Image (cartoon, rainbow, N blue to C red):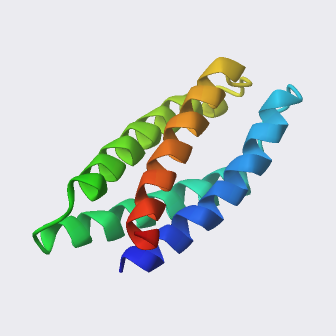
């Protein structure tokens, strides 16, 4: 299940790059990609939660989950701008992406270890 979560987050990250490029150009991101990005991120979180609930989760897995939950909260904040038809602040996009990347790399380190 860990491998599936990593794959889902990797695909979500590709969508995130598309979304971030729109915001960095000062444009609203496409809704379809935003929704897909959110659904993939949520699916990845559910998979990680299921892995943690199986018991004996390594500390790195719990840390990755915490980071990715923080990134998701940032994503909700970014979505609030989108709902108001405003381009999100670039700094918030960078923080969201940075936290998500660190969470993803922490997760990936489990697979590569």
In the displayed structure, 111 sits above or below 100; it is below
Q: Name the image quarter holding residue 87.
A: top right
Tell me where residue 71 appears, x and y as whole percent.
46, 40
In the displayed structure, 113 sits above or below 20; it is below
Tell me where residue 60 appears, x and y as whole percent.
29, 54
* Image quadrant in which the N terminus is located: bottom left
| Residue shown at the point (42%, 59%) measured from the top left | 107
Task: Tell which of 39 and 17 is nearer to you.
Answer: 17
| Residue shown at the point (70%, 56%) measured from the top left | 15
Q: Name the image quarter holding residue 10.
A: bottom right
| Residue shown at the point (30%, 44%) measured from the top left | 66
* Image quadrant in which the C terminus is located: bottom left
The answer to whether residue 110 is seen in the rendering is yes
Q: In the current view of this chain or complex, which residue is farthest to the left?
A: 55
Q: In the current view of this chain or complex, which residue is farthest to the front?
A: 113
In the displayed structure, 89 sits above or below 112; it is above
The answer to whether residue 89 is seen in the rendering is no
In the displayed structure, 86 sits above or below 56; it is above
Q: Name the image quarter holding residue 84.
A: top right
In this rendering, position of residue 19 left or right of residue 61: right
| Residue shown at the point (82%, 29%) measured from the top left | 24
In this rendering, position of residue 101 left or right of residue 4: right
Task: Tell which of 91 and 63 is nearer to you.
Answer: 63
Tell me where residue 49 appears, x and y as whole percent.
25, 63
Tell me where residue 4 appears, x and y as whole percent.
46, 78
């Amino acid at each position: 299940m860990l491998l599936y979560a990593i794959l889902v987050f990797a695909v979500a990250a590709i969508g995130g790059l598309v979304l971030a490029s729109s915001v960095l150009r000062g444009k609203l991101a496409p809704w379809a990609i935003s929704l897909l990005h959110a659904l993939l991120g949520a699916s990845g979180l559910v998979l990680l939660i299921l892995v943690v609930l199986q018991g004996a989760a390594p500390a790195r897995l719990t840390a990755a989950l915490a980071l990715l939950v923080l990134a998701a909260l940032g994503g909700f904040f970014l979505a609030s701008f989108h709902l108001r038809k405003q381009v999100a602040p670039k700094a918030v996009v960078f923080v969201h992406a940075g936290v998500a990347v660190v969470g993803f790399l922490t997760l990936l380190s489990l697979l590569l270890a």
